[in-house]
Amino acid sequence: MKAEKLNLGTLCVQGGWNPGNGDPRVLPIYQSTTFKYETSEQMAKLFDLEAEGYFYTRLQNPTNDAVAKKIADLEGGIGAVLTSSGQAANFFAMLNICEAGDHIVSSSNIYGGTFNLFGVTMKKMGIECTFVDSDAPEEEIAAAFRPNTKALFGESVSNPGGQVLDIEKFARLAHSHGVPLIVDNTFPTPINCRPFEWGADIVTHSTTKYMDGHATSVGGAVVDSGRFDWQAQAERFPGLTRPDASYHGLVYTEAFGQAAYLTKLTAQLMRDLGSIPSPFNCFLLNLGLETLHLRVPRHCANALEVARWLKANEKVAWISYAPLEGDKYHELARKYMPGGTCGVIAFGLKGGREESIRFMDRLKFISIVTHVADARTCVLHPASHTHRQLSDEQLLEAGVRPDLIRLSVGIEDVGDILADLQQALHG
Ligand SMILES: *Cc1c(COP(=O)(O)O)cnc(C)c1O
């Protein structure tokens, strides 16, 4: 049976690993840095990218590859590369097509770590980023593009603000400027949203969140739709369309066609910078993925009930959760992710920042952790924690109000979640 004929739930359970007769039923952990060959010639061909095979786990490992394939199939992509974190995924997705002197455009409604990566660290490397308000009209965002722009970036559902990206609008903007659209699809996961179906070219993930789902393993993924025509923009993407001196003058688009982008990412970035996940972490990620299709709907159902309850509560000043009727992003959410967005709710309390902190400290089993999107309900105050490095001005630019509480609703019994919120708000 071909993987692409299977539905999402079946891919979650069965995807990636297809054992042959007498093979282990469960994806094995290939806890080996290296792989054995009979002849020197066989190994040499691997180093020249002339033959396919495993030789060193920094480049490829069978456990990791099986999990990457599962994620690629879930997204409807042609392949994926796993990374040691979501940060590494977004960095590699960009660095694979950018170098010093280049420029990218990004929605400003993004994860704080990515905001710093694009705005500070990549800037030091000579890659500039213009942040745009993703809700602005198309003409306004178009003005941010320059001749040296290499990519457009956005989060399908932003962390922590919960803003929903108009993916088709962003795809039009990217393609009319000859660049790929890269979408970080961490929060909805492919269970709720598949950005490739709306024109995205590359999808990234922090698999640390719902995909792993149990807060055991930091990880990331870069998935390629295979649809962006690098050759048609040969001048803009010389790294893919001109000879690579580090591989005897090989040209990725000529040698690998559709697989050019991911092959380059593995062959150059993984080779030189590392950032692979361990096979053991991939094994844990795979266990998480086996129940993704069951957990995500439960997160969404619990979160909708909690969001409705919060909205009706007199102590709550404002709430942002796109599945709520009347939310600013309700229509976009209905279009791009009709089954729900995710379990993460943003809200503020009357009494502002101080009251938010008091409320969080009173919670019992709902804990304060630097995490989001796992089975256990948790809270965080981004202005004091994840986004602490940002000024109040930058916070607002990143769509994070200083009083914002990020509540990540888990898969416990919702009655208990409501009771804990109730006692903390009114206790
Ligand atoms: C957490 C997160 C990241 C960073 O991922 P790590 O796995 O923590 O490195 C990137 N993007 C989004 C949307 C995230 O939620």
Image (cartoon, rainbow, N blue to C red):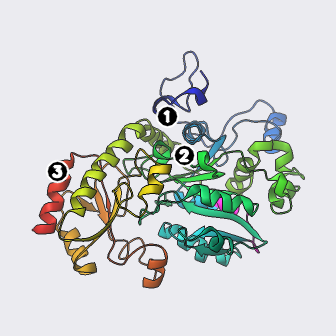
The quarter of the picture where the N terminus appears is top right
The mark that comes first in sequence, 2 or 3, is 2
Amino acid type of the residue that numbered disc 2 sits on in the rendered structure: Arg
Q: Would you name the residue on which mark 2 appears?
A: 194
Amino acid type of the residue that numbered disc 1 sits on in the rendered structure: Leu
Q: Would you name the residue on which mark 3 appears?
A: 416
Mark 2 burial class by Cα count in 10 Å: few <14, some 14-19, many 20+: many
Amino acid type of the residue that numbered disc 3 sits on in the rendered structure: Asp
Respond yes or no on whether mark 1 lies under 8 Å from ligand 1.
Answer: no
Identify which residue is drawn at 30% across, 63% down: 379
Q: Nearer the viewer, residue 78 or 19?
A: 78
Q: Marks 2/1: CA distance?
A: 11 Å
Mark 1 burial class by Cα count in 10 Å: few <14, some 14-19, many 20+: many
Image quadrant in which you'd find residue 118: bottom right
Dots 2, 3 in contact, CB < 8 A: no
The mark that comes first in sequence, 3 or 1, is 1
In the image, 169: left or right of 177? left
In the image, 12: left or right of 56? left
Task: Report whether residue 179 is seen.
Answer: no
Q: Marks 3/1: CA distance?
A: 30 Å
Provide the secondary structure element on which disc 1 rests: helix
Task: Report whether residue 109 is seen.
Answer: yes
Main SS of residues in magenta: loop
Boundaries of the magenta span? 92-102
Respond yes or no on whether mark 3 lies under 8 Å from ligand 1.
Answer: no
In the image, 132: left or right of 253? left
Q: Is residue 103 magenta?
A: no
Q: Would you name the residue on which mark 1 appears?
A: 8
x and y percentages locating residue 55 in the rendered image: 70, 40
x and y percentages locating residue 52 in the rendered image: 75, 36
Image quadrant in which you'd find residue 16: top right
